[in-house]
Amino acid sequence: MTDSARVQPLRSWLQNCDECHNCRSDSRPKKRFLPARLLNVHPSGDPDQLRLDDASASEGSRYLALSHCWGKSAAGQSPMWRTLAANLALRMQGFTLDELPKTLQDAVWVTRGLGVPYLWVDSLCIVQDDARDWNRESKRMEDVYASAYCTIAATSAPDSSTGFLGGLPRNNGLFVESADGRAAYVSTNVADFDDDVNAAGLNRRAWVMQERLLSPRTIHFTSNQVYGECGEGIYAGNGVFLRTRRGTKRYFQIDPRFPDRLRSSGFATTWEFLRSLLEDYSRRGITEPSDRAVAISGLMARVQKALPCPVHHGIMDWYLHRSLLWHRGKADTRGKIDYRSSTVPSWSWMAYEGPVGFLPDGFGTLDRFGHVSFDRTSLTTTVWEFTEPGLRVVDAGIDSGRDHIYDSMGRSRGWITLDGDTESPFPRYLAVLARLKGVQVEERKYYVLFLQPMKPQGGEERLWQMAYERLGMGMLEGGCELRNVGQGSIF
């Protein structure tokens, strides 16, 4: 069976989605976006020929986008098949299919089989050694995937050299008819979408979350079988259709106009979804730690526009108090990220490598405490200072994730989790963000950010008198002795 024939069921699924659903990108009433360059998979009658076209040459055409793992290169070496400044002109004139690794070749064959003229691949359509081109095009990723006719996910391919067509559906089932004339399809290939797709290596990569959520439709080529994912549910290659129930996490994930469905989901449901999204993203691997902010920038831009809700450095204004109360795993010893040309403030979880978590408390259990405002660089809020002597931190062990705070009498006063160096002295300053609802005054618990004064820079000591940076977060019991030191800025 030819690759083209094996793709035919997917072509039928896309056609049915085109006709019966409202998922495809070109059904939207706005001017269509096109990337700067697209790979022409049919530049001539020769199946071995390819060509890189600029946007003007592909105006009005459909394209597929590829989501894949590049894989690791040998030390000091870079993949030879990338588009570089030195070979860009040659790529625009034309080149051969065998110059590409197997995963990219498979993507070309699928694109042709689906009858789509163009394919977008990051390594081919962005000039990899041109910083200006990369910065411009990487910031347009949200539009690249959101505007694609469909995304091809090379889920079973651990790298660019492996290929993924082995996961295409074959005839592994049969139709049977019961005594009363009803027909059924029987297959030995069980559809397990979570194992085949969500747990796959590709979906443990940070960049891929944005690619998947912003794509109106995705075809997942797994090691078990193929799945077509659209706004109505999931089509499995064994003939099973997995419909998605409204209000579930997957229902929001497969939104073909992500995140429009969140607009009508309610305040609490929206936060629970976004919280789980950020926690998931923070656990994913990323080759360059300094890409941690840009790899989710498209998603955050969509959230900001759709809800609408200002978002700065992964912190959302609608849920400001809650999204500031993030914490790192105690066993995670990775430090701050060096963003080189930009600065991420200490109050953002994007400042560090590794996974983060947010308070799991039910949405109705917390009250905001005090006024907090923020912009791209700083938080402004009331700063408090401990006046109670003898407070100390007791290490509770790595497994606990947080350390205990005790007073001079040995009474528990709360807990703390530090973002960085756990050998730091006990923080003197804090900002109170929230408290538990509905308890007596003496039983109240307050959720806080622990702070330290920033060191003056450039001799401007006066300007830094009320400037702080975040050290961590935690909980304090009611009754702690504090002094209001006034409005401060947290950078």
Image (cartoon, grey):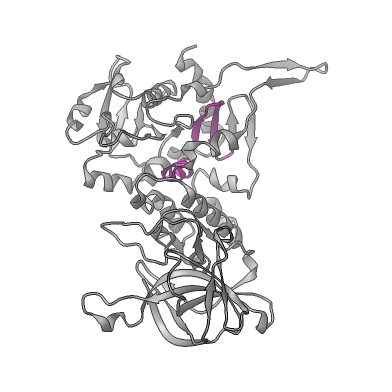
Count of marks overlaid on the render:
0
Magenta residue check for 227? yes
Residue 483 lies, with reference to residue 16, above or below; the image says below
Write down the quadrant of residue 479 in the picture: bottom right
Residue name at image x 27 percent, y 34 percent: 78
Residues shaded magenta? 205-233
Front residue of 172/101: it is 101
| 192 relative position to 151: left or right | right
| 87 relative position to 185: left or right | left
Residue 188, horizontal then vertical, whole percent:
67, 21
| 472 relative position to 97: left or right | right
Residue 317 lies, with reference to residue 215, above or below; the image says below
Residue 42 visible to an observer of this rendering? yes
Residue 470, horizontal then vertical, whole percent:
42, 70
Residue 219, horizontal then vertical, whole percent:
50, 31
Front residue of 291/110: it is 291
Residue name at image x 38 percent, y 54 percent: 293
Residue name at image x 46 percent, y 84 percent: 385
Residue 470 lies, with reference to residue 218, above or below; the image says below
Quadrant into which the C terminus falls: bottom left
Residue 419, horizontal then vertical, whole percent:
45, 64
Residue, far top: 1
Magenta residue check for 444? no
Residue, far right: 179
Residue name at image x 30 percent, y 76 percent: 455
